[in-house]
Amino acid sequence: MTATPRQVVVTGLGATTPLGGDVASTWEGLLAGRSGVRRLTDEWVEQLPVHIAAPVAVEPPLERLEARTLDRVQQLALVAAREAWADAGTPEVDPERLAAVVGSGIGGVLTLLNQYDILRERGPRRVSPHVVPMLMPNGPAATVGLAFTARAGVHAPVSACASGAEAIGYALDMIRAGRADVAITGGSEAAIHPLPLAGFAQMQALSRRNDAPQAASRPFDKGRDGFILGEGAGALVLESAEHAAARGARVYATLAGSGTSADAYHVTAPEPSGAGAARAVRAALRSGGLTAADLVHINAHGTSTPIGDVAEAHALRAALGDALDRVAVTSTKSMTGHLLGAAGAVEAVIAVLTLRDKVVPATRNLDALDDEIDLDVVSIDNRSIPGGAVLSNSFGFGGHDVCLAFTP
């Protein structure tokens, strides 16, 4: 006889994004249809074919020591985690029952590249003694774990643009398995630098609408020509339902399930039929004891790439069948840009807010839906939705597929 999994609820939310320095301002920006994409003003920009990106709207408010000894990706993770923890009411929890699971697709790339420049130009004695802990991919998770004394485990999934979502799914599994009662989880990314921008541009992955930054991210639109590189972080406090009830916590939603799969197709391109992503969607529904008929909304991965958006549409149709016709789909990357390893975490926060307020932010810049995309994409105006289950999709280079399912 299979035991019923422990119910896991969301009690705290935190974020710093291109739309705002916290959850409230980010959500307000999404509902207003604002874009966080802008033209970069750094001197090095002119040598690149892409001049636009989506930096965070508010610089991380940190103490001087934190600013000196933490890479930007760690700083953003800490800002989001602190907000989520405060939002959850600063839970009293045995440190040995508290976990930190924070993903990043790249980690401390700014430290790595900037310190290498220092090494070449000024010599090894000028390299920071903090360089190794600042550049390591588990740096955001370690930073959050140390800040909150998380002794049940500190974990750092690295699965490209699915990292934040995979971290949340891992935290769900930890609590369900009884390895923790509370988890601070999410994702962070800070990679706006000439090298990542040049690399993505060489792959033809980035939009080149340099003269129209706010119109550049166009998920599902016929005229889309690539994604916008963004930065930011998202965090959730997850608790077992019993732990949350015992302390009288306010509950936003239930994290009902998660699903993961792998395309095993190509290191950067999605499997065209969406078969791998469809398996992740089905797995998330099974994990949450849900059916396609329970769904009312999907926050799509929707990066604004010509191939990726079509593959996701095929995946959703394969996984959900005719039930998809009654599901409102949106891509908030049309406003935030693509936050890489932080995207799934920020979008999980947004999915929870969608459940709370029963409103779906409209996809920006969708002037003409691609003929190959058979989805009911919310555009122009925000849409009210009934109560029901919500999915959040995240897919990453390497063929990583992750889907999270939330219920009221």
Image (cartoon, rainbow, N blue to C red):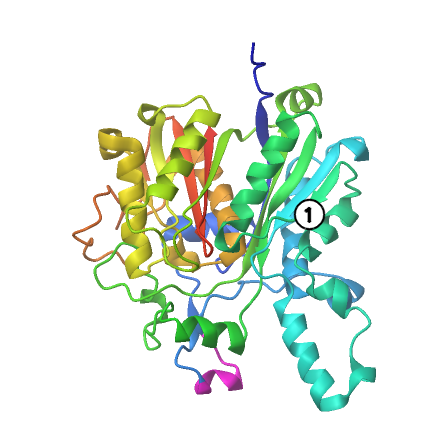
Relative to 189, 279 lies left or right: left
Residue under label 1, please give it.
82
Element assignment for label 1: helix
Does the magenta run of residues contain 45? Answer: yes
- x and y percentages locating residue 261 in the rendered image: 45, 41
Name the image quarter holding the N terminus. top right
Vertical placement of 253 versus 160: above or below?
above
- Which region of the structure is painted magenta? 39-47
- x and y percentages locating residue 262 in the rendered image: 45, 45
- x and y percentages locating residue 192 in the rendered image: 53, 70
Q: Nearer the viewer, residue 84 or 207?
A: 207
Q: Say whether residue 10 is visible.
A: yes
Which residue is pictured at 40% across the width and 75% down the height? 202
Vertical placement of 320 versus 25: above or below?
above
- x and y percentages locating residue 106 in the rendered image: 58, 61
Identify the image quadrant of residue 403.
top left
Residue that sits furthest to the left in the current view: 371
Which residue is pictured at 67% across the width and 36% down the height? 183
Which residue type carries mark 1?
Arg
Residue that sits furthest to the front in the current view: 264
Which residue is pictured at 68% across the width and 54% down the height? 138
Q: Say whether residue 364 is visible.
A: no
Which residue is pictured at 18% across the width and 56% down the height? 368
Residues packed near mark 1 inside 10 Å, few (<14), some (14 to 19) or many (20 plus): many
